[in-house]
Amino acid sequence: MKIALIAHLKFPIAQPFSGGLEMHTHLLATALQARGHAVTLYASEGSTASLGLEAVCPPTGSAFDDVSAERIDAIEDAAYVAIMDAVADGDFDIVHNNSLHYLPLLRAPELTVPMVTALHTPPFEPFMRGVRARAHDMTFAAVSESLAREWRDLIGMPLVIANGIDLKAFAYSAAPKGAAHAIWMGRLVPEKGPHLAIDAARAAGLPLRFAGPRSDPAYWDAEIAPRLGPDITYLGHLGHAALAREVGEAHVALCTPRWEEPFGLVLAEFLACGTPVAAFARGAIPDILDESCGVLAAADDVAGLGRAVTHAIRLHRHDCRRRAEHLFDADTMTDRYEAMYQTVLKDSVPRAGIVTHARAPLLDDA
């Protein structure tokens, strides 16, 4: 198939990834290409050129630090207008909307091929404006059961296609290395709660190594820098290989979201490496972790998370890897997206040069 893949524009779709959505988009494009599909990725400048890149603007989350939010919104609006114009003129079989913007949804009826949309976040405006407009005639896929439930009142129950990871890139480590220590990784922003990971690791008496982009300098200065010490090591913003090595060497991993995490790709990466997890019970996390691979604490309960760390570190690493293989294989994820594309294309009905389509039935997500 010829597939147009529309990314969000905040950060480049390239390593080192700014977050899970960038990594997912890169992996999906790569996996589809490996299966012989022709993928054109519409994304911000700096994204990986080999993904069939059509770069439309500088990354709006990092290239416009001194620009007002209103101006950034205008830049994104103009970029998505340009993307949809290009998609409408392109020779595609299907459009996969992986963005968080309302414009691709509003303009989908202008296309002569069907569009599907993957939901990666809880409902928010103005994205909901676009979703609401297409609730009756577009197929949606949510990345977790908990996220599907959050969208249910607006669009009914969407498909559930869990995110996958490259299990070879995050290879299994049968034993940790060095003195006992914990690992945390992700964007260094308030909603990810790395300062709480530092506090919890200290409560458990373990050194902590953490990695990720310093996306919020004010947060770093206020919450992270004052907590640094000889037991806390910032590793920087790492690529896949270095991250996998650090995770595999750690004795336990922490996950500390301060919002209802819709998925949490870091959990899949931790488990793939065999590293057990202590985490706050928020969003999709209770669905991802079971008693074989993780221990949960109440949201924002640092003392509870510290206790969870001391229990999680005793879990068996091979059980963690088995959980990752069962739930998060990128091949399985790609199979399900391909099945969704085929169902949507089968149900598409041309009318006066415009393609309409019924929503696909639920796939078997067992």
Image (tube, grey):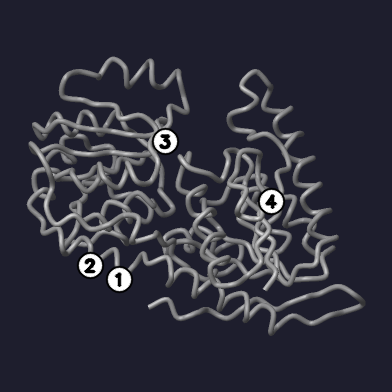
| Foreground: disc 4 or disc 3 | 4
- Type of amino acid at the residue the image marks with label 2: Arg
Secondary element at tag 3: loop
Label 4 vs 1, first from the N-terminus: 4
Picture quadrant of residue 51:
bottom right
Secondary structure of the residue carrying tag 2 is helix
Residue located 22% across and 58% down the image: 172
Residue that label 1 marks: 326
Outermost residue, right side: 352
Residue sitting at the far front: 50
Residues at circles 4 and 3 in contact by the CB criterion of under 8 Å? no
Q: Answer yes or no: do the residues labelled 1 and 2 have beta carbons within 8 Å?
A: yes
First along the sequence among labels 1 and 3: 3
Which residue in the protein does label 2 denote? 322
Q: Amino acid at mark 4?
A: Tyr
- Give the secondary structure at mark 4: strand
Q: CA distance from mark 4 to mark 1?
A: 31 Å
